[in-house]
Image: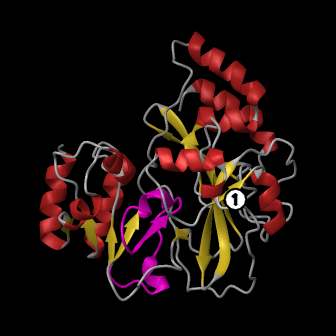
Amino acid sequence: MDHVDVKYINLISSRLGKFKKVKPHLYNFRCPICGDSQKQKNKARGYLYRVKNNTNYKCHNCGISVSFSSFLKSVDPESHKHYTFEKFKDGKTGKNFPTESPEDIFATVDSARPKFKKKVSIDLPDAFSVPISKKYLESRAIFNGKFFYAENFKEFVNTIKPDTFDDVKFGEERIVIPLIVDSKLIGVQGRALSTNPIKYLTIMLDDDAPKLYGLDNVRKDEPVYVTEGPFDSTFISNAIAMCGADADVGNWGISNPVWIYDNEPRNREIVNRIGRTIDSGDSVVIWPSNIREKDLNDMVLAGHKIQELVESNIYSGLQAKLKFTTWKKT
């Protein structure tokens, strides 16, 4: 781990709840972005860890995954200025780029499906009715979906989950993506409309709830497509989306999932996830070599007929392994 990164990790450590050094190049603490579990104050699901020459941050509560530079800028903007200068002085760019999680550092345990008691509603305008959010969505060719607009995301979150954020003064505009199970709101994801490096924030009303979008609208007796993000799911029929991490969709009545990962054969995390999906026996989309776009949204913007493209590239078993081997070499 870079010595400048270590210096600034130690510098802010006193402000990170339950901070501890797990082992060399791996630190654990309560996530300062989402506040971590509100019910269990001893839970700490934020991690700083090394990948090659970079340091990355990941929270297993809200799903955020950013470079240490972006994390530090959010937690302590003043320290970030000094950090950037020191990286530059050391001959670095001053920027850590987001990198994939190393295999097997984090283990998730899926529990039995919980029952959600609270019924919370969203009292916000539809995102397509507000000029700034409508412009953003339509610029990405998104013309449908259950999305809302919050002028102050932190303030809104505190109305549905009190005391999540201590200071709402600088809450920013975000598109609010509702996560709903059994007609009950169990979480929200906020997509920044500003230049905030933390583009997505996921807030769960129940720690045991699935970080999945679209569960309330799919036909579970048919193949259900599982995309990397909520916006991507709007381009595919009968689709749900992961909001930060893989989930055991079988716990939610989905017996025939088709997993759609981003088209990034150089991304170790995605490669590992596809490999695990194939080994589990599930179906997965393996992109053909002529597709250069990174994700479903980029493919739509490039003019591809996305439903047809997805349906013609679904594989499982031995055939999936063969296609996967070829794709990794792309």
Residue 45 quadrant = bottom right
Q: Quadrant of residue 225?
A: bottom left
* x and y percentages locating residue 122 in the rendered image: 73, 69
- x then y, percent, for residue 6: 63, 31
Give the image's coloring scheme: secondary structure
Give the amino acid at mark 1: Ala
Residue position for label 1: 44
Q: Residue at x 85, y 48 (%)?
A: 168
Rendering coords of residue 272 (x, y %): 33, 56
Q: Which residues are magenta?
A: 228-256
User: How many badges with numbers are in the image?
Assistant: 1
Asked whether 190 falls inside the magenta stretch, the response is no
Quarter occupied by residue 316 = bottom left
Camera-nearest residue between 172 and 61: 172
> In this view of the protein, which residue sits in the foreground, 23 or 161?
161
User: Dot 1 surroundings within 10 Å: few (below 14), some, or many (20 or more)?
Assistant: many
Q: Is residue 50 left or right of residue 44?
A: left
Q: Is residue 98 above or below residue 224?
A: above
Query: Element at badge 1?
Result: loop
Q: Looking at the image, is 182 positioned above or below residue 197?
A: below
Q: Nearer the viewer, residue 290 or 286?
A: 290
**Residue, x 44% and y 80% (percent of image)?**
218
Q: Residue at x 59, y 25 (%)?
A: 3
In the image, 35: left or right of 2?
A: right
Viewer can see residue 97: yes
Q: Front-most of 16 and 298?
A: 298
> Left of 77 or right of it: where is 26?
left
Q: Residue 81, percent across and down?
A: 71, 21
Quarter holding the C terminus is top left
76 relative to 61, above or below: above
Q: Is residue 177 left or right of residue 153?
A: left
Residue 285 in view, yes or no: no
